[in-house]
Image (tube, helix red, strand yellow):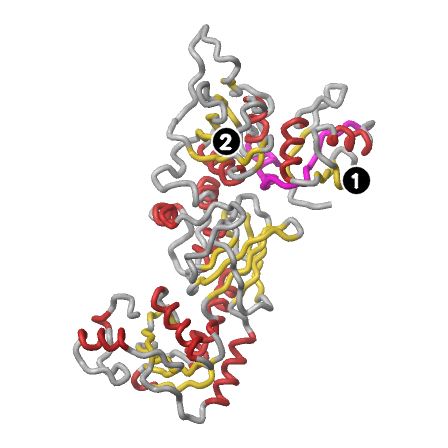
Amino acid sequence: MYNNSNSGMSSNSDGAPNGSDSKKLRVEEALPSRVIHIRKLPNEASETEVIALGLPFGKVTNILTLKGKNQAFLEMGTEEAAVTMVNYYSKVTPLIRNIQVFIQYSNHKELKTDAANQVSRAASSVSISSPVLRIIIDNMFYPVTLDVLQQIFSKFGTVMKIITFTKNNQFQALLQFSDPVSAQQAKLALDGQNIYNSCCTLRIDFSKLVNLNVKYNNDKSRDYTRPELPAGDGQPSFDPTVAVAFSKDSSSLLGKIPGALNPLSAAAAAAAAAGRVALAGQTGSSGVLLVSNLNEEMVTPQSLFTLFGVYGDVQRVKILYNKKDSALIQMSESNQAQLAMSHLNGQKMYGKIIRVTLSKHQTVALPRDGLDDQGLTKDFANSPLHRFKKPGSKNFQNIFPPSATLHLSNIPQDVTEDDLRLLFSNTGGTVKAFKFFQDRKMALIQMSTVEEAIQALIDLHNYNMGGNQHLRVSFSKSTI
């Protein structure tokens, strides 16, 4: 109830006797009441801020502040709302103006004051700004995950719930604070800021929603007040041990100064995004990935080179001789490995959901001279198909998660829409839409699923269209 802070308890606790033991006992025995006693308020705390502590849990019907004693009594509309509030703040530190306050049930069953009208006015002024923010991320060249958002926004108050989704091919999130004041402060400080160096710009508005209904705790949605929720939909559930391990490496993550975002290098950005799979000790240490649950009948070093090459320059690929559903992939840099892992872990390749983790190996060994390993190991170090060899290449700005829409470039002038539709249908998928750019050297083509688009990219990136013109294929952030 007191966040293990009995030493900080005030002696004038709502009629409790002196002596920390008896007070501790009294708190544990306190009967639920719809009146909440709040202590240790900052001197400048307003009634609006006190009311905001209770609003996420239900209607606030009355308030009594004792300015001289830095205390307040908050009357909730129902006892159930009060119980939910006290239970929540027993696990999460209640803050007003970044200062911890202390919350318990009061001995009073109701407040007999004439402040009720005042409360409805104050509560409505708080409600104008919802505790829920709608966040859109522009220029998303590096992945941004739920855990990254929680880390940034929790500098401004208690983050209770987050839901992430893609709309109009843009990554968006709804994020609920415990109170509208924190949401207001976060919006003022963060709107228009970049999460990482010159990219991933936050666009923030208040949502019309005042409460989010989260059904699953996974990498798309999270309710921090209900850790018992199922993962659902086969999504990886949130592993708190990974979060703890990862948070130890927070020096490389978002800045520790309240309200400020530290620009991140690409490596740290991708590491943050892959937080659920990258443990602190491994972060950024290896450029080698272990890919498992591959379709061993279909997969080749070339197909892995093409797919993983979307996120970095693949140097070597080795399909394991004794375990042909697994492969080691060596990228040219550790941040490229992090980026590939965060985008491709959990995607479908040849009908199977692949798992991508960092390997403990530092390099992928080539077979000894004269040893035939059935073409399972391939060296791509001198491949002309590396997308990121040239510093400042446009490819750095066009790194997107796998999507059903593909971007095509280097299209010969005499190739028609029908030619391309037929070519992409032959990869086993269905073409849903097609659109040429004005110069007809580039186009967008939309498959019916992300899995079909992955397959088409593997089959047709670098496809010879005739006259030695090779098609370039990448994932697009646009829809048609």
Cα–Cα span, label 1 and label 2: 41 Å
**Residue at left offset 71%, top offset 21%:** 464
Q: Residue 429's quadrant in the figure?
A: top right
Q: Residue 191's quadrant in the figure?
A: bottom right
- Residue under pointer 1: 438
Q: Is residue 82 left or right of residue 439?
A: left
Tell me which label, 1 or 2, sits earlier in the chain: 2
Can residue 399 be seen here?
yes
User: Taking 418 as reference, is 478 above or below it?
Assistant: below
Can residue 329 be seen here?
no
Q: Residue 344's x, y, as percent? A: 53, 37
**Quarter containing the C terminus:** top right
Q: Residue 4's x, y, as percent? A: 25, 66
User: Of tags 1 and 2, which is closer to the observer?
Assistant: 2
**Quarter containing the N terminus:** bottom left
Q: Residue 322 — which label?
A: none
Range covered by the magenta-colored residues: 391-413
Q: Residue 474's x, y, as percent? A: 64, 35
User: Taking 16 as reference, is 383 above or below it?
Assistant: above
**Residue at left offset 45%, top offset 63%:** 160
Q: Residue 315's x, y, as percent? A: 50, 23
User: Taking 421 as reference, is 276 above or below it?
Assistant: below
- Residue under pointer 2: 293
Q: Is residue 476 left or right of residue 234?
A: right
Q: Amino acid at mark 2?
A: Asn
| Pointer 2 local density, CA inside 10 Å: few below 14, some 14–19, many at least 20 | some
